[in-house]
Structure formats: C-alpha cells, structure tokens
Image (cartoon, grey):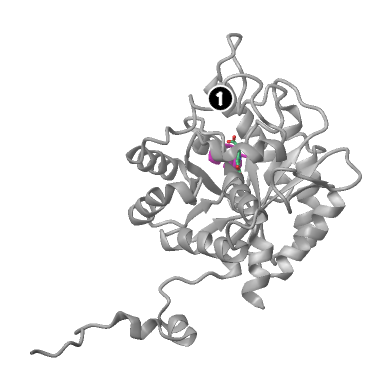
Amino acid sequence: MTAQFPAARPRRLRRTPALRRLVAETRLSPAELVLPMFVKEGIDAPQPVVSMPGVYQHTRDSLRKAAHEAVEAGVGGIILFGIPAVKDGEGSAADDPAGIVQLALRDLASDLGDSAVVMTDLCLDEYTDHGHCGILTRSGEIDNDATLARYASIAVAQAAAGSAVLGPSGMMDGQVGAIREALDGAGYTDVAIMGYSAKYSSAYYGPFRDAAECAPQFGDRSTHQQDPANADESLREVFLDLDEGADMVMVKPAGAYLDVVRRVRDAVDVPVAAYQVSGEYAMIEAAAEKGWVDRERTIMESLLSIRRAGADIVLTYWATEVAQSLNA
Ligand code: PBG
C-alpha cells in the first residue's frame, strides 16, 4: 500500500491568524476609502436616512464634524452630495455659488486642507424638481447636449468652491469632455475628473433616492445609464471617458458588478474606483439588524471582495467605521 499522505496541503498556510495575515493577497486600508456624504439646505439638525441606518443628511455644521471624524480615521477622501431647499426644472441651485454644495465645499476645503481629498458628485438629479439627471425637452426626454452645458457650468462652480475631484455621474454622452473643456477654459487645469464611467441603471440605488431626495417623478434612468446585461459596453464607456480626459474611472454599483471591475482594472492604466452603493449598504444593515448575518464580518468581506476584484479606490458609506476598525 502506498503512503496515504496528500502531496499538497494548502491548509498549512491557513492554520493560524498570523500565517493568514502574512499570506493575504489583498489588504484593506483607510487611505483608499472614500466616504459619500449628504448636506441639506434649510435643516437645523442632521436627519437620519431611514433606509440607510447610520447615514445622515447633514447640516453644514454636522457635515464638518462628520468629515473631521472621517479624516481623523484616515479616510482618503469624501465625496459630497447636496440637497437644495428649492428645486426647479434646470437645477439652478447646482451651480449657484451660494448653493448648499458650494457653501459646504468651502467649509470642507478650509477645514480639511490637504488631510483628505474633497470631491463632488456632479449631476442634476438632486437639484431638479422632476428628479432627472438633465434638462428635459418639451416631450419629457433628457436633452443630452443642453445638459452638457449645465454640467460645464456646475463643474466651474464646484471647482471655484474648492472641489479637487469632480465625479460626473449623469451618464450623458460627452460629459467628461464638456467638463474638462469648461474647467480648462476657466483656469482650473488642476482639478481632476473621476468619471462614473460604467454606471448601471440599477435597483441598488433605491435608498440613495431617499437620502438625496431625487427619485425621478416619472420614467427611469434606463435611457442613459447602462443595461445590467452588458459588460463589453462598460469598456467602451471607460475608453470614451479616458479619451475625453478622465483621470480616473469608476464602476457602479460594485458588489453585483465585480466582473466589470476586474475587466476595467485589466484594461486601463489609471486608478479604478468602485462605488458600493446605497442598496448594498442597506441590504447588509437590514440583514444584520435581523440577526441573519454577522454585520462586521459581512461588511469587511464585501469591501475586501471589491478590492480583490481590482478596485484601487472604494466609495462606501461605511468608510469611517471601517477605517476606525482597521486602525484599532
Ligand atoms: C446621481 C447619483 C446616484 C447615485 C450617485 N450619484 C443616483 C442615481 O443615479 O440614480 C447613487 C448612489 C447610491 O445608491 O449610493 N447623482
């Protein structure tokens, strides 16, 4: 009888926590995490977002405190979303120098200095009364090119208020080029663009629409956001954005699109971000609240998996908490 011993024993390297730590292929650190934050005009106390326990619509003051806490924990950046008190058809508050995002940006730029990167989401849906990401034609369709002119103006307003990285998220054709041209023309040649390049038309954005009060009043976003059936198309979008001047690209959502994250990472030589969106957050929080999953382990596994798929930067509503626990 021959020896009964297996020739290979992969379990040897899994035996102790120290061994597992030594051979881990992927690591998480606070520096690559970006915290999405909401600031709302006209409230005097932070308002909890019901579908996202632990997430708030901030006042200018509470935003400063929460941003400070994130930066203390070593979070690499924050990305700001604004909710104006008054919305209209053109989303006028979006590029108003006295609009809520611009005011909050000025606060953060002066508070945080160079301790973290201050970024902004650049879109119209939080600012329009109809909740769409662009200007509408009379028949209620999104007018791509009229919308580009609005995005260009918002880009300059955000840059003037101190945003270091703009994240155009509206999925209009030509948006990165239009923004780059406007920024350069206004002298903001150093302001970077992180394209939401492969952004899917996703049900996982549900809770965000409560947080940012931007559910479309009619129709949906499937005429501009990508069809979840497609992955090759995301490479096309990524290359178009790079041609138009994007400095980084993003895949969104993250967890259900890890194949896309990997394909994009393998195809480009710029930093790749992935956005763990509101629905990904809400599902884990809800299941954990019911006691059905171990909250901390599930959060860590979800983030590690996004990194393992190839994301260099991860946008997550858990950024502060996770950074704190990585430091502990
Ligand atoms: C558009 C925007 C959305 C999100 C980020 N930017 C909403 C949408 O496209 O409908 C979703 C983020 C999330 O779900 O966490 N301004």
74 magenta-colored: no
Residue 239, located in which quarter of the rendered image? top left
Is 308 situated left or right of 40 in this image?
A: left
Q: Main secondary structure of the magenta part?
A: helix
Q: Residue furthest top?
A: 139
Give me the residue at 76% from left, 42% from top.
101
Residue 116 appears in the rendering? no
Q: Nearer the viewer, residue 306 or 272?
A: 306
Q: Residue furthest left?
A: 1
From the viewer's perspective, tell me whether residue 5 is left or right of residue 119.
left
Q: Which residue is mark 1?
A: 220
Asked if residue 88 lies left or right of residue 41, the reply is left
Q: Nearer the viewer, residue 99 or 198?
A: 198
Instruction: Say which amino acid is labelled 1.
Output: Asp
Instruction: State which region is magenta.
Output: 180-186
> Where, quadrant-wise, is the C terminus in this rendering?
bottom right
User: Mark 1 vs ligand 1: CB under 8 Å?
Assistant: no
Q: Please say if 253 is above or below 220.
A: below
In the rendered image of this protein, does residue 271 appear above or below residue 83? below
Please, what secondary structure does the residue beneath circle 1 have?
Answer: loop
Q: Residue at x 59, y 56 (%)?
A: 292
Does the magenta segment cover residue 185? yes
Left or right of 41, for residue 269: left
Please, is residue 77 above or below residue 58 in the view? below
Residue at position x 65%, y 58% in the image = 318
